Image (spheres, rainbow, N blue to C red):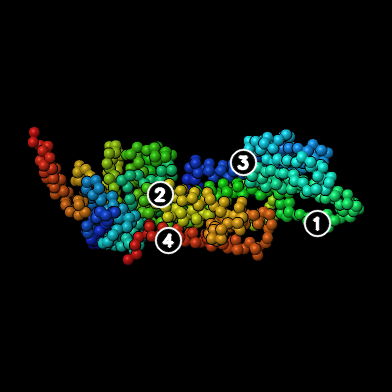
Amino acid sequence: MMIRQCLAIMQRELFYMWRDKSLRTILLVGPLLGLLLMAGVYSSQRIENISTAIVDLDKSSASSQVITDLKNSQNLQVVAHFDTFSQLEESIKRGEVIVGVVIPENYGKDIALQRQTKVAVLIDGMNIIYATNASSAVLTVTRTLGAQVGIQTLIAKGIQPNQAQEAYQSIAFPEEAWFNPTANYAYFLVLAFALNVWQQCCTLASCMTIIGENGRRSWYQIRTSGISLFKLFFCKSLVHIGILLLTVLPVYFLAFVVFKLPLACGWSSFLLFTLIFILALHGLGTMMSSLSPNAVNASRYGMIIALPSFLLSGFTWPLQAMPQWLQHVVWILPQTWFFQGVSFLTFKNPGWGFMSHYFWALGLMAVLFYSVAALRLMVRDFPHKG
Amino acid sequence: MEPVIRVTNLEQKIGRKLLFKGISFEVQPGECFGIFGTRGAGKTSLVHILAGIDRFKSGQVQILGLNVNKTEKFKRSLGLVTQESSLFRDMTVVENLDFIAALKKASRAAVREMIERFQLQEFLSKPVTSLDIGVLQRVSLACALLNQPKLLLLDEMIKDIDLFSRNLILKELEEFLAAGGTCVSTFSNFAVSQSFSKVAWLEGGEMTIYDPEAAQAEWNRQENYYAEQSGRYDD
């Protein structure tokens, strides 16, 4: 009879979630749409062809060499040549070009006379990501150009070409980007953004666990039936947790199998980590649900937590760059542990010794959140003792 | 004989309003106990307290000899029909019957029996939100009777429903009482007062118990009094 009761509750919950069209759409379509949109947004994977304009006030062979080097650059695309600085300024203001290079008058002459000269490089800083990439692309060109001119100067001073070259290469700084060697934005952001959409949908759904029952008149049927509320909410939660896990599986399939995003750890570890996060997140939603006077407020509370949690997780803006007090506060949220853990597991797989405290933290959060929800329910819905 | 319901010095406060000022009453096995009161008198609140849904400020409530503050075991022998439908709105008639049967640990045979007794065959696959009030109350009572309760709590059950459903429900209630069941029912229309063994009149947070004839006489007296006071009979 007890199994029949549990099965009936689970079946009813499953039907309820399926029949609720908006909930069904949010859970089924939301995360997948998020992934597809993000995959589309970051499909180029890197920022290339950064529009560049040149103002050549020198018109010498040396300045032509600079222009050629800029044109040959991997990520810059020379799209305009202006005669004056003000034309360049106007073009940057209108957003037509991101990078402007101004080669001064007498540039060639100053180089030939081994005098110091300045090539002005102007970067539109309005979009930080664009500006950082532009800066990096320009730096590659200017570094090479500076070295070439330096070597030529040394040769002009009578130093042997091989000695001049060695002088500039005496200290090498070989760069080696680990885990995401091509600095691929898609690897970094697509899965995380899709999981952000998913966790928001999950939080919303979880926020209905308790208030979705005791906020309706059918709660009278449940209360007079004498069924244990622990049994009722345990069975409901099992269904929720199963559904939340099922909704993320297509996202993972598309991300790792179709789009071939990196997954350094094994599937089983990643799914286990996801499951423990779902428990913590569902616990959080259930707690919010138990504290809310009605369903509308429960959704509001859920969104207040779910919306900023991704930004606070330190995934896009590093935790180390946040104020000290905030660095501690953000670890209260399961989302912080999850997104940090996702980074480690997808790129690095640092092993159980390192990841175990992520699992423990999420597990303890789940216990804490469910306990608060149970206590709140007891205070509100159980009869007085004595 | 042990009363089915024993309420002693019950006090209930809603916000700042004292809804019950220490009311006491008993309901004996086999009785059909009517609770009368105008809107806001506290009929529904009292039913919810008896059903173990609402808490109360002070006093003692015993159902079938069990203190409702200490145990929920009495709910096994309880059936409730609320004033506004408390069926599961996202489910059909048969799904409600099946689910409530599972909650109450009632058998599938009990579900089939209720479908027969309340003539619900043609409505089984309909969502409860699409039902007429009479059919809805038939389903509600069928659900309340699934666990073969000893005590039925009915809140304004037969108000404004079609005559067929009304008679079907009354027939089932008579059979329930004849089989030894006890019933507490709220009402706000004196046309049905004669069907009760006792009538409890709730007014101003206090309860006065009458036999049905005395309750009817008191109703008539008050109706005449207030008609005179308002000048309605002057013409």
- For disc 1, the marked residue is A172
Q: Amino acid at mark 3?
A: Leu
- For disc 4, the marked residue is A375
Residue B34 visible in the snapshot? no
Q: Amino acid at mark 4?
A: Leu
Q: Secondary structure at mark 1?
A: loop
Query: Please, which chain is the residue tagged with disc 4 on?
Result: A
Q: Are marks 4 and 2 on the same chain?
A: yes
Circle 1 or circle 3, nearest the eye = 1
Task: Name, please, the residue furthest toward the left.
Answer: B234
**What residue is rendered at 74% in x and 44% in y?**
A119
Asked if labels 4 and 3 touch by Cβ distance under 8 angstroms, the answer is no
Circle 2 or circle 1, nearest the eye = 1
In the rendered structure, which disc, 2 or 3, sits on the residue that comes first in sequence? 3
Q: Which mark is residue A294?
A: 2
Query: Please, which chain is the residue tagged with disc 3 on?
Result: A
Whole-angstrom CA distance, mark 1 to mark 3, is 41 Å
Q: Amino acid at mark 2?
A: Asn
